[in-house]
Image (cartoon, rainbow, N blue to C red):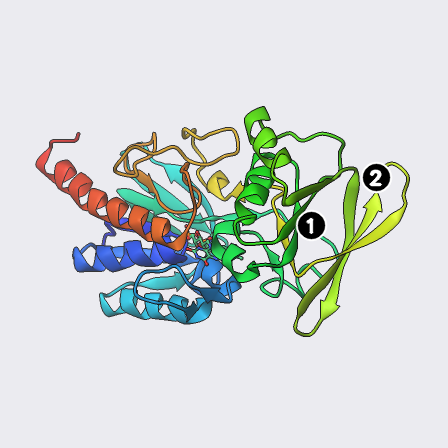
Amino acid sequence: MSKLDLIIVGGGPAGLCAAMYAGRGMLNAVLLERGIPGGELLNTEKIEDYPGFESILGQDLAARMTEHAKKFGADIRMENVEGIWKQPDGGFKVTTSNGETYHAPTVIITAGGTPTKLGVSGEAEYAGKGVSYCAVCDGAFFKGETIAVIGGGDAAVEEADYLTRYAAKVYLIHRRHEFRASKVVQERALSNPKIEVIWNKKVLDLTGEVIGLKTVNLEDTVTGERSALSVTGCFVFIGFTPNSGLVRDHVAHDATGYLVTDDRMMTSIPGLFAAGDLRVQLTRQVTTAVGDATTAAIAVEKYLTDLKTGVRA
Ligand SMILES: Cc1cc2nc3c(=O)[nH]c(=O)nc-3n(C[C@H](O)[C@H](O)[C@H](O)COP(=O)(O)OP(=O)(O)OC[C@H]3O[C@@H](n4cnc5c(N)ncnc54)[C@H](O)[C@@H]3O)c2cc1C
């Protein structure tokens, strides 16, 4: 393999978009993806908020993005990245489970993250058929319906409030007797007449029919008493873990592990860029992921030029 300019880690929307721009910029780049390219698009039934597509299946958008990146020469390899290491020469070493090692002066990490799952029966079965981990993405599918939101932190309480713009009623279910969410967020949700808070309940399982979710089955965390709620949607907000631990040197991040970048998407490590869901930002969508990736890929070109011309030592 000739000398690489750039290694892209992760092949979701951000990684594929970065690979497309890297190809157009004539960079010698490789994209390392542990599975089929597409990232969270492959777990999303329909996307209705990507400009130019009023409605498109997640897997179709993933296939189009992959083909588009390949058309501009993207070299996509199935590799599970184990670590990204800063090297004494200022470049990077990327190691994979296949025992491969890649070297390049720049890396864009776009490895996304994983929403924490409830881990109960029915959760996987009804994912995309009532169970969701993204209010902005899926809220509009529940107009006039009764839904549940699970969690007690800022994300759960804020999203419960947000979802009342679509749903007729939102049960906000928390396993404790008080929320962890900030006071101002709590007050807004608690004064919303469409929200009913259900305290001290944990989800036992989710049941329904072929068409979708019908019931959230609960257990009282104090008395053990069981109950059931009829809902067509269940939004789970009990945590999200960004895959930023792949960076093996100290890199600036927030308390949850999201990577901090500047306006060029560069992290606190020069030459290491981050784009998409694993970056600190207000919202996490396909549009924001590809926006970040565009900036990152173009910033990489400028960074490499600066290295060559000695502007950056
Ligand atoms: C259920 C659901 C529905 C959604 N619906 C919408 C919607 O309707 N509209 C919208 O705009 N957004 C939606 N989103 C959000 C959107 O999917 C994400 O914001 C977007 O996919 C982020 O892109 P990304 O490339 O940053 O990360 P991801 O899509 O998470 O891609 C990361 C990629 O990195 C790979 N990776 C991770 N670790 C490694 C490793 N160690 N080695 C190699 N590869 C690795 C993963 O396999 C994955 O392919 C939804 C999300 C979910 C979960």
Residue 146, position as x, y percentages in the image: 66, 56
Separation of marks 1 and 2 at Cα, in angstroms: 15 Å
Q: Position of residue 78 (x, y in %)?
A: 43, 63
Quadrant showing the N terminus: bottom left
Q: Which mark is residue 221?
A: 2
x 51%, y 67%: residue: 45
**Residue 118 percent coordinates (x, y):** 69, 50
| Figure quadrant of the C terminus | top left
Q: Residue furthest top?
A: 183
Between circles 1 and 2, the one closer to the viewer is: 2
Q: Quadrant of residue 296?
A: top left
39 up-or-down from 201: above or below: below
Instruction: Please indicate, yes or no, whether residue 2 appears anywhere in the rendered image.
Output: no
Residue 127: image x %, image y %? Answer: 62, 62
Indicate left or right for 136 with 221 as reference. left
- Residue 158 figure quarter: top right
Amino acid at the residue labelled 1: Leu
Q: Residue at x 87, y 36 (%)?
A: 222
Query: Is 295 above or below relative to 231?
Result: above
Pick whichever, 148 or 284, lies toward us: 148
Question: Which residue is at a point 41% across and 70% down the rendered structure image?
Answer: 56
Q: According to the image, label 1 marks what residue?
A: 118
Task: Label 2, secondary structure: give it.
Answer: loop
SS of the residue at dot 1? loop
